[in-house]
Structure formats: structure tokens, C-alpha cells
Amino acid sequence: MKNTIIFLAAMLFAVGTLHAQYEPLPGEAPSAAAALTPEMLKALDQSVPLTPQMTAIRNALANASIRSLTINPDVANGIDSLFTKEIKNPGGITNQKDSGRCWLFAGLNVLRPGVITKNKMKDFKLSQAYEQFYQALESANLFLELAISLRGEPVHSRRLDCLLENFITDGGNWNYVRALLQKYGAVPESVMPDDYAAAHTADMDALIKTRLHKAVIAMRQTSITSPAAELGGVKQAALRDVYKILVLCLGKPPATFAWRYETKDDKVSPLETYTPQSFRKKFLDEDLNRYVSFANYPGQPMHAHLEWAWARNLADQPNMEAVNIGMKEMAEMTLKSVLADQPVWFAADVGADADKEKGFWLRGIEDQADLFGLDFTVSKADALAYDNGAPNHAMVITGVDVRGGVPVKWKVENSWGDKHGNEGWFVIDRPWFDRHVYQVIIDRRFVPPALQALTQQKPILLPPWDPFAD
């Protein structure tokens, strides 16, 4: 009898029918008292009379986007493209196209100026597609490991939903770049350039996601008491299929390659053969562990060491982490870096206060309040806490305009190609920086000892669905 009960329980678990009854909170259930009544609708209609001014706004919105009508040109008046300091030899503008690889483009672009300057190159670009191949493969491996550990979770638990819905994306952070370069090295862009699938990732990602979800189903249909070797077989089969998808979409990464470059004085370097690791060691020669991650996360303790669960791409590498600091501290370290010709990787909310065509991120440049007659103000802390703002794009700061010893605006290298902004370059002012920048990666040389010491604190572990890293 006991064995029969265990068998039935295992079968219920396997087919996913063992669910708890949902208990609604007061007010969740259907209720006539909660409905929009005719009286309420009439009151709403009377509250918005179509005045001549309202009619003019309505006519304009019928034929143009909200953003195009809210850009305030006066905010940009006096904002020029001049900077008191610009990074030497930043390299040409790159284009991530229809992909979410901004973190990778920004990470590789941070490393370019030193390579160009040291070798007197005309230009230099690292291959994003090469790193992208292993990023997708490593992420699939980590996904499958997490799926094994979560197979006892109920269907639609928050952990499992977070894994299934949010994990297989193009997103990433600086620690992803560091881990890929340390394990797999790097190759020049010409050796493994972006093809269509690399630059338009939706279809490829969808295939990978479906194949990995099939593996999760197979794992959860296996008895929870099955040996790990049996689950390992499911994992290996899925990884083989993911590898095949990546080879067909992106091509096989090179094990060795021959490469040469052109210098600024029109000379051509000797043709040499490299492995990805020998190339990285010769040209990048970077101690990637010298970069320190800082966040501005209102709502979390100031000067605390933060860590985000699952926010990594390699199963054996550390999660994303950062020391939580104020924006004045962040600006001071960024300024020191740029003045020393060290570009700065940063992450920001680029959906706010933007004129993307002209290349301006300026606080208040979008004036929705006057167009609609409504107050849309939300604090930085509330924007994070209530999913109304988060670091959603990574770029590189390559210049600064200093007045009276204070940075008033920054020059930004974006990865949207040369058709946006000033041939791909953008300007952000200091108020925008303070409000919409959430994270910077700073060379340890420019980090005060007191802030460096905070990295040794035991971190506060935040959940994988935390809005900062979600």
C-alpha cells in the first residue's frame, strides 16, 4: 500500500497536476461593486471636455507619435557636441542591429581604445558573434542545471516561471563579458563577423528556448527519485541540439585563424596565426578582474555589497554583483576614468528623456506633462521598485565636458550604428546621468580605497526576479 501511494504521488508530480488551490485576496473575485457604472462613465466623460486646445492635441496625436510631439527643442538649446576631454582612439561605431547584445558590444568596445593606440591601428573591432556563440551555449548549460535543481518546484512557481520566461534572452552584464573573454578568448570581427542570425536574434532565440523547454518537460516527467545520470542524459541531448542550432545560425567558432591589420601610416602588419586565447593575450592583455561594479539602487542599503541570484552566464562563475553608491561618487570615479583615457561601461534606462534621432539624453527633453496636462513624475527608487524604470541598455562613456571642475555632460559611444545620434555618438547631461544611470564598471585604479573595501563585504543576495537585473 505504501509503495502504491508513493507511485501515485510520483505520477501526479510527473504530469504536473499536483497544484494547490489558488486563494484569492479580498477584491480579486468578480464583483458588481467594482464595475464601471453608467454614472461613472458619464462623470469621466464630463471631466474631459473637448476644448479647442484638447481638439488640437487630439488632431496632432492622430497623425504623429507621442514622443515626436513631446520633444522640447528648447531643452537642447546650448547643448553642443564639444567636450573638454575625449578618449583617444575609441574606434568606429558598431551596430548591434535587432539584438539585445548591447552589454557585449559595450564590453568589447571598452577594450578597443588601448588596442588601437598601442598598435597604431586605423581601426579595430572585436567579434561579437564569436562571444555570442559561447554566450548562448553557456547560458543553455546554466539553464539546464537550474532546471534540474528546480524540478521539484510546482508548475508556475515564481522560481520556475522566472527561469522559463526570462532566462533565455540576449541580455547580460559586464560579468558576462569578463567570463566569456577569460574562458574563450577573443577574435577580430573580420574572422567571425555578424551574419543575419547574429544581428537578428529573435528566431534563433525562440528555437533555443523551445528546445530547452522540451528538456525541462522531459526532466519533470522523470521520477523525482531518478539518478542524476538519467537527467544528465537529458541535459546532454539538449546541449547537442543547441550547439547544432548555433552552428547553423552563427557558424563554427574558429580554433585557429590567420590575421593582420593596417596601421595609421598605411602599413600592413605581418600575417600571423592565432588561437582565440593567444590573440586575447597578445592584443587585449587585460586583467579583467581589475574592473569593479558599482550600482545606484535606491531602496537598497547605501554602501552595501549587492549580488543577484542567477545573474551569470557560466555555471561556475560568480553572479553579477555591485557596491551600491550615490550618484556623486559614481560621477567622480567616471570623471577620473575618462580623464585618464579609460572608457567606462555603464547601464541606464534609455527609454526616458530621449531624442534618439539627434543623439540627446537630456533631463526634461520629453515634455509629456504639458502635452497631456498630467504629472508623470516617478522617483528613481519607485521606478525600480514598481517596474517603471530599470537599467535596460549598456553603452560606453568616452568623453566629458568639465566646467568649474564638475562634469556637466558626457560623450557616449552607442551600438545602434551611425544612423542615430551624431553619426552614432550621443550626449547625456548630468541631470540625466543622475536620474537614469544605474550601473558603472570602474577600473580599480580610480576607486577610492574605502569603496574598494566594500567589495569584500558579504553581499546581500537579491532574487533572480529583482527588477535591477531582471
Image (cartoon, rainbow, N blue to C red):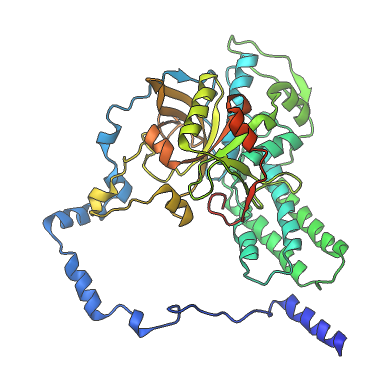
Q: Along the horizontal axis of the image, is 414 left or right of 457?
A: left
182 in relation to 240, above or below: above
The percent position of residue 188, horizontal first and vertical second, equals 67, 28
- Most extreme residue toward the front, as rendered? 450
Seen from the viewer's position, the closer of residues 17 and 431 is: 431
**Residue at horizontal 75%, vertical 25%?**
281
Q: Quadrant of the N terminus?
A: bottom right
The percent position of residue 148, horizontal first and vertical second, equals 76, 62
**Residue at horizontal 37%, vertical 20%?**
404
Q: Can you tell which quarter of the image residue 145 is in? A: bottom right
Seen from the viewer's position, the closer of residues 363 and 82 is: 363
Q: Along the horizontal axis of the image, is 433 left or right of 103?
A: left
The percent position of residue 251, horizontal first and vertical second, equals 71, 42
The percent position of residue 393, horizontal first and vertical second, equals 51, 42
Q: Along the horizontal axis of the image, is 117 left or right of 328?
A: right
The answer to whether residue 360 is visible is: no
**Residue at horizontal 22%, vertical 79%?**
39
Q: Along the horizontal axis of the image, is 352 left or right of 414?
A: left
Q: Can you tell which quarter of the image residue 146 is in? A: bottom right
**Residue at horizontal 49%, vertical 28%?**
332
Total marks in image: 0
